[in-house]
Image: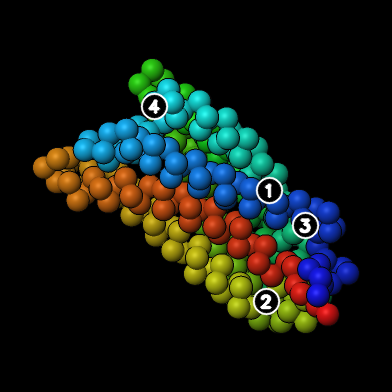
Amino acid sequence: MSTEIRHPDHPLPRVLAYSALFLNVFVFVVVNFCIYWARWRWIEADPTGRPPTISLAISSSDIGPVFAIWVSVSAVCLVFGVWLLIWHYLGLLKRCLAPKRSLTNTIVVSAILVAVAQPVSALGMHWLSTFRLPFAAELHMTGSYMFFVAQAFVVLIFSIVNMMLLNDVDSLSEMEVKGLVTRRWVKIRLVTGVISVILALAYLGLFFAKDHFVYPEYPLVYRAYVSVEPMVITSFLLVLVMCHADMFRRRA
């Protein structure tokens, strides 16, 4: 048994398909390690203190510089990984004989929007990791807003694309016959994307709530806020990794 792209007319050349997989999985692993490692290191040093946000954790000189290097590298990788996914989805569209106009318009417009939004998110990743509290608070927060807003937008767009794929039954069936996608994974990606957007909205609500229900008077609000933050980042990156789930098949 060997793992390879099943259909010879796959939207991405094999080397680019594997490159996209490597880049997006690399980012998923490295960024998740960094955010949970940073918080763990801070808590280990101050176990009785206030639970740290990622921003607070990376303000430590023992954590921040390492975090900045790996997150900045990941930001660059994520741009190229997502651009390759855009190519993949445009290629899927070209391999349909008669896609609905709504699907065509959605994928083309989405490709343009994501191609712009992902570099904005990446720049935010670099800024929030390089400019740290307390000395560069304004630039750090600007980077944080850029990342969360732009990456949530990217995930929302990917979710809409998967929803439109499910809506175009004939084109999706054609893609399945050609071995390009599977309906099951399109549904899973849609559900995962929706959950990710809901988590992001919950995080936004907690972001404002923590200023009204301050710690330590309302510890549950603040603990929920700092706990949901890394979950949102994980969910963002998971959606992108899952785009590769049916790009590779096993055959005898």
Residue at 81% x, 75% y: name it.
1
Chosen colour scheme: rainbow
- Alpha carbons under labels 1 and 3: distance apart: 10 Å
* Numbered badge on residue 59: 4
- Alpha carbons under labels 4 and 2: distance apart: 44 Å
**Crowd rating for badge 4 (residues with CA inside 10 Å; few <14, some 14–19, many 20+):** some
Q: Amino acid at mark 3?
A: Ala
Q: Amino acid at mark 2?
A: Thr
Q: Amino acid at mark 1?
A: Leu
Q: Earlier in the sequence, mark 1 or mark 2?
A: 1
- Looking at the rendered structure, the secondary structure element under dot 4 is loop
Q: Earlier in the sequence, mark 4 or mark 1?
A: 1
- Alpha carbons under labels 4 and 1: distance apart: 27 Å
Residue at 64% x, 78% y: name it.
183
Query: What x and y, as percent, mark residue 90?
Result: 75, 59
Q: Which residue is mark 2?
A: 182
* Numbered badge on residue 23: 1
Q: Is residue 155 left or right of residue 77?
A: left
Query: What x and y, as percent, mark residue 38?
Result: 42, 37
Q: Nearer the viewer, residue 110 or 129?
A: 129
